[in-house]
Each structure stands twice: as structure tokens, then as C-alpha cells.
Image: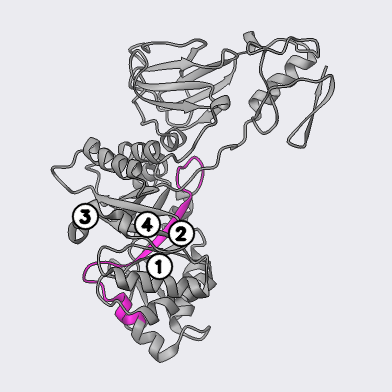
Amino acid sequence: MSKVTLFILSLFLVFTDLFAQKEVSGVYVGGHIRRERPGTITKLRNSGFTYVILFNVHVDKDGTLMTDGETICKDGQYVFQKTQPYYQQDVKNLKTAPTSISRIDICIGGWGNDSYDNIKNLIAQQGTGRTSILYKNFKALIEAVPEIDGVNNDDEHCYDVASAAKFHIMMYDLGYKTTLAPYTNKTFWTSLCSQIRSSRPLAVDRTMIQCYDGGAGNVNSVGSWNFTGVRERHAGLMYYSNDWSVDKNMAQFQKWKDDGVATGGFVWVYNDETWDLNAWASGMNRIFGAITIPEDQVAVRCYSDKNFGGYCVALPIGKFTQADLAVYGLKAKDLASLELVDNTCQVRLYTSTNCTGSNILRRSSVKLLSTAYTDKVCSIVVEPNPTAIKEINSDTPKNKNHEAIYNLNGQRLNQIHKGINIVNGKKIMVK
């Protein structure tokens, strides 16, 4: 193999995360993930959900942070390791590759939860400065578990704008972003968002409209929850609804997307093993576009049905674990046919979650995979086909059948010039 061929091959294989992942699919997770670890952590990492909300952190009357009756932080110290020795590592693992999760929030509030009443009283007594117990305990939490990115406000009782705004400003200064999860009392939430953002314009970065239980009436009015300056508006559904199949839920998410009222979605709540997280997350990612691939970067199209039917997910060159595929929108064990768009590429299909073990190689489109791989594929590698790579020089005809060259960012080059080719500031030597 010539040096030029080797160079081109290396450019194919050096693939970086060229396409930014958006946080469009979220799930609340309960104490089940601690009780049934480590399996639940692995399942979440492979799910496709792009963010998780840990339910919940309760603020006690004296400022102690609790969950499920256990103490997280007290008197400015993180003490959760005494009863949950794996918690810090588990939360860290949620963001550790291979994973689909890029953000973790903690939820404060919920039905019957008096955290915001306690926060109101504590702020009245101590304020939110460095000597206050609220500041000390949440500082201890973020230092112990730095993977936590924000706090999700699910106030369903107190509704005091002044104290809640001061609390979230304090949290932002500590390093926590804020998401709001209303289901009623629009006046309160509008005022709260406005007060927080008037002091800290970047603090509130998402609203999450509850469209279940008490908020069921919001299904047809998601667009009315419009907070100035907050672009991300997600609508949420509940798994525990007997008359709502995955398909019916996806149809509702699709309607919100088509109507232009939601930029993402979330689901309540992962608290047992009776449902398929991957089916929910991959569907939501496909609908809301967790990753968008420019047409000229598409190497292969994956279809859920034979003969290129069902839903379609486009992939560029790269290595895609089960978590990666779910972010692109392909559910595990749901691939039946594939179309090879770039004839200089080949595809390896794996039944494992992480592109390991036995695989099948495909160098052309296939209308129906073999029985051993139809509806069994969990990970994929799209790579250069070495038999299709030829030595390229400056005299090679420049037409649509031209052999492909990619730069170190994984971008396809459309023009070849003798000597040094400069694309996006990167120099590439071409014979």
C-alpha cells in the first residue's frame, strides 16, 4: 500500500465527535438506581437519554439535604458515603463513556415536598451568603459530586418568588444551572424566571412542562408556557399510563415537535425495570434531533424494517456504541436493512453493545440482514473500505465518483489541489 493510500486511510480512521449532541431527551430517576446498582447505571448509560434528573434532594428544616430518608449533606459536610458508598462513583459513571448522558440535574420539590417552604424560612433567617447552611451544604454537595450540573425546581406548594429567586441565584453562583418544571400557577413561574434572569441571565436554561397527573391539561397548551429568554422548552409524559404505549407517546412527542411548541421531551420516572428506556430515548432523540448530520457527511442509512422501510437513521463515518446509536435515534436490536451511501465505506455490525466480539461486514446495501443480525444489532462501525481506496494525485478527475478524502475533523474534502490543501485551517499533503 502506498504512503498516500496509508495517509488517506488514517484520515478515515481518525474520527472525532464532529457533530454536537443536543440535550433533547430526559428522564427522572428515583432511588431505584441506587437500590439496584450497578445494573441501573449501565442501563442508563446505554439508554440514549441525553440528560437525567436525580429525584430527589429534600431540604430539611435545618438545611440538611436528604433523599429517601438518608442524609446527603449536613452541617456543611458530605456524609452520604456512610450509607451509599458507591453513589459518587455511580454518578460519575453516568457521564463516563460509553454513555449517552451529558447532563445531570438534581430535583428539589415534588408533590407533598416542603423543601421550598424550608428554603424560604432558612433564607429569612440566614440569607444565602457563605455562612448560611444552604450555601454550605450545597457547596459540599457540588464538591463531592461535581458531575451534577444543575437543580430542577419542582415546587408544587410554596410558590414564593422572592426566596426561590434568591435560592437559584445562590445555586448559580455555586455552579448549578436551573431548570423549571411547572404544571400550574403560570404567574409564579413567569415571575420567578424573570427575577432569576434579571440578576443571572444565563441561570435558567430550560423549562420542562409537566403534561401528566395534575398537569395533564398542558398536553394541548405546551406552547403557552413561554418564558422570555429561555429557548429550550421540553414537554414531559409519564411512563405509568396503561393506555399509553411507546408508539402513542412518540406520536405525542412528534406532534409537539411538528407544532413547534417543544424542543425536547422528558419522561417520569425510572423507578423499576418494567419498561424499555432505550425505546423511549432513541425515539425522542430521533424526533427532536439530538444529532443532525449534514447530507454530504452521511455514509450509511439504517432502517428499522426490511427493504429500506420503517424509520431511517443516518450515520457518518465512526464507531457507534449502543448509547451512540440511541442518541442518533436507532433503537438497539431494531436494524433490518441498510443503505450504503458512500461506496468507499464499509459497515461492521455487532450484537454487542460496545463494538466488540463477532461481527458481520457489509460493503454494499442490503435489503434484509441475515437471520443472525436482523433485529439483533446493538453497535456499528462505519469505516473506510480498503479495497475502494486508491492512490489519489492532483490529476485525478474531480467528479461525483471521485474517491473520498477526509480531513482530521472527519470532514469530506471536495477539492484536491497539488501540494498543500488547506481546509478549515488544517494543512493536508496531497501527492
Q: Secondary structure at mark 2?
A: helix
> Is residue 78 in view from this perspective?
no
Task: Work out which quarter of the rendered image holds the N terminus and state it.
Answer: top right
Image coordinates for residue 404, horizontal then vertical, percent: 66, 18
Q: Secondary structure at mark 3?
A: loop
Per the model, the C-alpha gap separating discs 3 and 1 is 32 Å
> Is residue 301 in view from this perspective?
yes
Per the model, the C-alpha gap separating discs 2 and 3 is 31 Å
Per the model, the C-alpha gap separating discs 2 and 4 is 15 Å
Name the residue: 48% across, 70% down.
Answer: 197
Mark closest to the chain's N terminus, 2 or 4: 4
Residue 178 figure quarter: bottom left
Residue type, numbered disc 2: Gln
Name the residue: 51% across, 43% down.
Answer: 21
Q: Do callouts 2 and 1 mark residues in contact (Cβ within 8 Å)?
A: yes
* Residue topped by disc 2: 88
Which color mode does the image show? one colour
Q: Residues within 10 Å of mark 3 (few under 14, many from 20)?
A: many
- Viewer-side residue, 290 vs 105: 290
Mark closest to the chain's N terminus, 3 or 1: 1
Label placed on residue 80: 1
* Residue topped by disc 4: 53
Mark closest to the chain's N terminus, 2 or 3: 2
Per the model, the C-alpha gap separating discs 4 and 3 is 17 Å
Residue type, numbered disc 3: Tyr
Residue type, numbered disc 1: Phe
- Viewer-side residue, 385 vs 315: 315
Residue 373 figure quarter: top left
Residue farthest to the left, as pictured = 243
Image coordinates for residue 252, horizontal then vertical, percent: 26, 42
Q: Which stretch did the figure color magenta? A: 96-119
